[in-house]
Image (cartoon, helix red, strand yellow):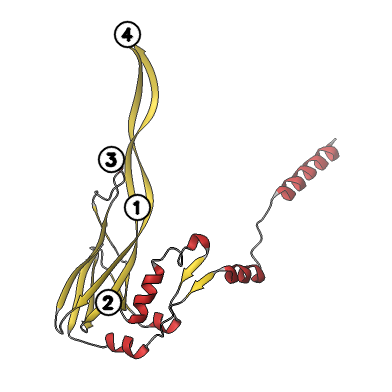
Amino acid sequence: MKKILLLIFLFGFSYWMNAQYIEPEKSVKEAEKKKQSEIITLPKSKFDSVVAKNMLAIGKSKITGVAFTRARESKNFNMKTGNKVNANQMKITLYPVTPYFQEFYKLYKDKTKHNPKKNMFVEMERDAYRYRLEAITNSDGEFTFPDMKPGKYYMFGVLDYVTTYNSHQYTGSGYDGYGRIDYYSPYSYQKNDSELLELFVEIKQDGEILKVKLK
């Protein structure tokens, strides 16, 4: 009898083990095939590193600002009318607005060229990507780009934050002399949000302190 029970146990354990399915990792060939299926668009203009380098050379101007957004509120149709959300410890990237970058940005905003859902991407040349500046905000969302020269610049950052929504949940029904009564209780839930903050700015004269809001 004990042997029979042992065999049943071993058979059941073996079946449970065999029922497990572990998703295999994609092979190098599969990853490469997916990469080859991507449609990559690059600007046709030639990137001029001398122009970009000169625009990012040390100057006497400064860009200071604050990065933030507004929380979405369900009571106002999910519009950004809630409390101010400061960009805490967010990286802000700044590019000089060269002719090459202008073409890149136009392509990037074109949904027929850049659409990740359709595996379509607009990219910059590696050298163009290198010519940039970065700043990290403090807990109040404040940031600074010192030693800037006059010129046009583009800055952006991705702000991740949590939004709290308030609603009412059905908890049951009852009856009185007038008929049925439905009961609801308030509850709240949270949702992770991510928002692109971007801005074009221009320093018009050397020594200028430009104050901006990145939102």
Dot 2 and dot 1 residues touching (CB under 8 Å): no
The location of residue 156, given as percent across then percent down, is: 32, 69
Could you tell me which residue is drawn at 46 percent across and 64 percent down?
A: 112
* Disc 3 secondary structure class: helix
141, 100: nearer the viewer: 100
Left or right of residue 186: residue 60: left
Quarter of the figure with residue 32? bottom right
Mark carried by residue 162: 1
Counting residues from the start of the chain, the first of labels 3 and 1 encountered is 3
Of the residues shown, which amino acid type is indicated by label 3?
Lys
- Can you tell which of label 4 and label 2 is closer to the viewer? 2
Marks 4 and 2, how far apart in space? 70 Å
Q: Which residue is mark 3?
A: 75
How many marks do you count on the picture? 4
* Disc 4 secondary structure class: loop
Marks 3 and 2, how far apart in space? 37 Å
Marks 3 and 4, how far apart in space? 33 Å
Q: Which residue is mark 2?
A: 153
* Disc 2 secondary structure class: strand
Of the residues shown, which amino acid type is indicated by label 2?
Tyr
The location of residue 29, given as percent across then percent down, is: 66, 71
Of the residues shown, which amino acid type is indicated by label 1?
Val
Counting residues from the start of the chain, the first of labels 4 and 1 encountered is 1
Q: Which residue is mark 4?
A: 177
